[in-house]
C-alpha cells in the first residue's frame, strides 16, 4: 500500500510540474504575440518580408562581377 501511495505521489508531482510548465509556455507565447503585434514595421522590414532584399543582393552581386 505504501508503494502505491509513493507512486501516486510521484505521478501527481509530475503532472503538477507539467501543468506549471505548460502555464509558463502559454504566458511566454502570449508575451511573444504581444511583442509581434507592437513591433513597428519600417520600410526596410517590409522589403525583407516581401523578399525584395534578396533581389537587391543579387543585383549588387551582378554589378560587382561586371
Image (cartoon, grey):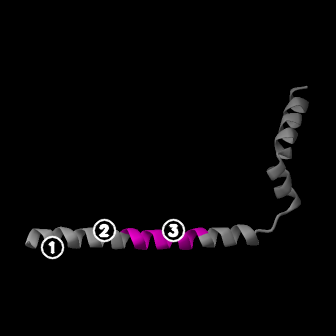
Are dots 1 and 2 in contact, CB under 8 Å?
Answer: no
Span colored in magenta: 18-29
Element on which disc 2 rests = helix
Gap in Å between the C-alphas at discs 1 and 2?
14 Å
Residue 24 falls inside the magenta stretch: yes
The mark that comes first in sequence, 3 or 1, is 1
Q: Nearer the viewer, residue 23 or 3?
A: 3
| Residue on which disc 1 sits | 5
> Is 36 drawn above or below residue 49 in the view shown?
below
Q: Residue furthest top?
A: 66
Rendering coords of residue 3 (x, y %):
10, 68
Q: Is residue 1 left or right of residue 23?
A: left
| Residue on which disc 3 sits | 25
Crowding at label 3, few (<14), some or many (≥20) Cα neighbours within 10 Å? few
Residue 60 falls inside the magenta stretch: no
| Residue on which disc 2 sits | 14
Rendering coords of residue 8 (x, y %):
21, 70
Q: Is residue 25 left or right of residue 58?
A: left
x 9%, y 73%: residue: 2
x 48%, y 73%: residue: 23
Q: Nearer the viewer, residue 59 or 1?
A: 1
x 51%, y 68%: residue: 25
Rendering coords of residue 21 (x, y %):
43, 69
Q: Quadrant of the N terminus?
A: bottom left
Element on which disc 1 rests = helix
Q: Residue furthest front?
A: 1
Amino acid at each position: 500500500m505504501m508503494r502505491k501511495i509513493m507512486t501516486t505521489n510521484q505521478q501527481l508531482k509530475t503532472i503538477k510540474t507539467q501543468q506549471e510548465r505548460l502555464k509558463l509556455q502559454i504566458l511566454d507565447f502570449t508575451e511573444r504575440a504581444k511583442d509581434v503585434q507592437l513591433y513597428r514595421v519600417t520600410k526596410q522590414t517590409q522589403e525583407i518580408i516581401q523578399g525584395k532584399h534578396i533581389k537587391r543582393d543579387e543585383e549588387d552581386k551582378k554589378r560587382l562581377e561586371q
